Image: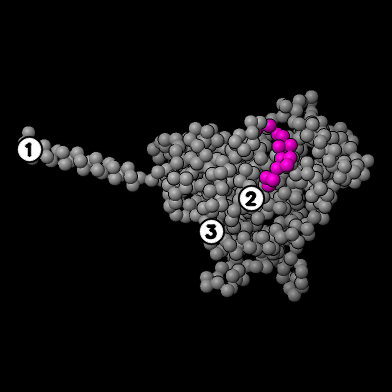
Amino acid sequence: MSSSTITAAILLALLTCLWSLISTLSKPKLPPGPRPLPIIGNLHKLGKLPHRSLQHLAKEYGDIMSIRLGNVPAIVVSSPIAAELFLKTHDTNFTSRPKIQATEYLSYGSKGMIFSQYGPYWRHMRKVCTLQLFCPAKLEAFAPLRKEELGGLVRKLKKASKEGEVVDVSEQIGAMNEDITYRMVLGCTRDDRFDLKAIVEEALLLEGAFNIADFVPFLAALDIQGLTKRLKIVSKQIDQLLEKIVDDHEQVARTKTGKQDWHKDFVDVLLSLMNKPLNPNDEQVHYLDRENVKAILLELIIGALHTSASAIIWTLAELLRHPRIMKNLQEELQNVVGMNRTVEEYDLPKMDYLSMVVKESFRLYPSGALLLPRESNDDITINGYDIPKKSRIIVNAWSIGRDPNVWSENVEEFYPERFVNSNIDLRGRDFELMPFGSGRRGCPGMQSGLTTVWLVVAQLVHCFNWELPDGLLPQDIDMSEEFGLAISKAKHLLAKPTYRLI
């Protein structure tokens, strides 16, 4: 071999080593995570209950974990400390929502508020929701409505109590919440032409699903999971419902021209803003059109209809599983309210144990096991890890609620007393407990939902003793969950009420 050949071989080897070194140095240092497969990445590891699967993986790879969902890089956050970094310290870089197929169909191309991209339109709609839909005055104005519907449920249960019947608690709570939603959001009574509850449940499942079409676009046309077909069906049902509601409200509005203070429900408020500049003083003016109104209405319906009912059912189920806690709560209610009247909303701030019970329920069963995903606006480095632009940020609130570093060893136990002398709040300021999200993208209807949960739980526990059917033991209640945009109890809760007030 000639000296020139040897020299060339040495140079080639040096260049190869140099190229390998440069590639290694320039390659982003992602958080640790499981090795992805070709094409699908780590989608196969999610299973039927992704919140549990991701918790299991985080135990191996850490509370900031990198996974790949098809072509999409994703960062899974599984501790309060890590959540604070993404939702507070670097919140401005994670304000966007990823575009997914479900919102294209169900949110009119992300024209609502929850799934819309961060920017001037989102900021103005957030302001409208905060100041006009969920303001304290509006919350107070709907208090008689909540009282009336809850009173109707108590009367039904009282009748069942006299007849010794076993009640489908899940069904009764869902029906009451549906009636409240119709009247509060839509300004009408239940319409038998539309099965609103079934439509919303389907929408929740589809919006929460890990859709292969979102992560491996070239497979979208095959509709391997059948989700696109289901999305087309439910989006048509939703549009028919919303069109009818908007048409009815517009017809009423024409008869109210010139009259003051007639905007009573959420549809009225949104229609009063339609085709008017939301931000007349800005250089780029934004308007609310018909599709914006329908998209926002659907988000309001989903939030009002499902999350509150689910939280109430989980709470009552845990109280039935723990007679000691049920007795403690009844004693507090008896001391604060007495036994000769029902609970009023003004009683709620006086009930510390009730507050602890609801906090503990949200710790174990957050409204969304995985907070709505965010997307990184730019490349950023957090805790020494490189987070690429367009990465999906998944905060596992379910896992955070079971973090033994925060909640001690009995993390799976329903134990409200853990909040005694605790300053942890559930409104998003404390990252140990954030069932409604946190930061700029936190839920604007949180106070309305909390009021409903507190009131209904208090009323049903105060008015009735509850017995499990057919000799079922408390520890045998099925507490399995069903995954979706919101986490639901898979099996209906059945119980026998006995009226206990004087």
Q: Position of residue 167 (x, y in %)?
A: 79, 36
* Element assignment for label 2: loop
* Nearer mark to the viewer, of 3 and 2: 2
Would you call the spot at circle 1 few (<14 residues within 10 Å), some (14-19), or many (20 or more)? few
Q: Residue at x 52, y 36 (%)?
A: 58
Residue at which label 2 appears: 429
| 403 inside magenta stretch | no
Q: Position of residue 186 (x, y in %)?
A: 71, 57
Q: Position of residue 144 (x, y in %)?
A: 82, 55
Q: Nearer the viewer, residue 62 or 493?
A: 62
Q: Is residue 443 visible?
A: yes
* Nearer mark to the viewer, of 3 and 1: 1
Residue at which label 1 appears: 3
Prevailing secondary structure of the magenta residues:
loop
- The quadrant the N terminus occupies is top left
The answer for how far apart the CA atoms under marks 1 and 2 are is: 71 Å
Mark sitting earlier along the chain (3/2): 3
Residue at which label 3 appears: 118
Q: Residue at x 93, y 41 (%)?
A: 502
Mark sitting earlier along the chain (3/1): 1
* Element assignment for label 3: loop
Q: Residue at x 84, y 35 (%)?
A: 465
Magenta span of residues: 411-425
Picture quarter containing residue 353? top right
Q: Residue at x 62, y 71 (%)?
A: 276
| 420 inside magenta stretch | yes
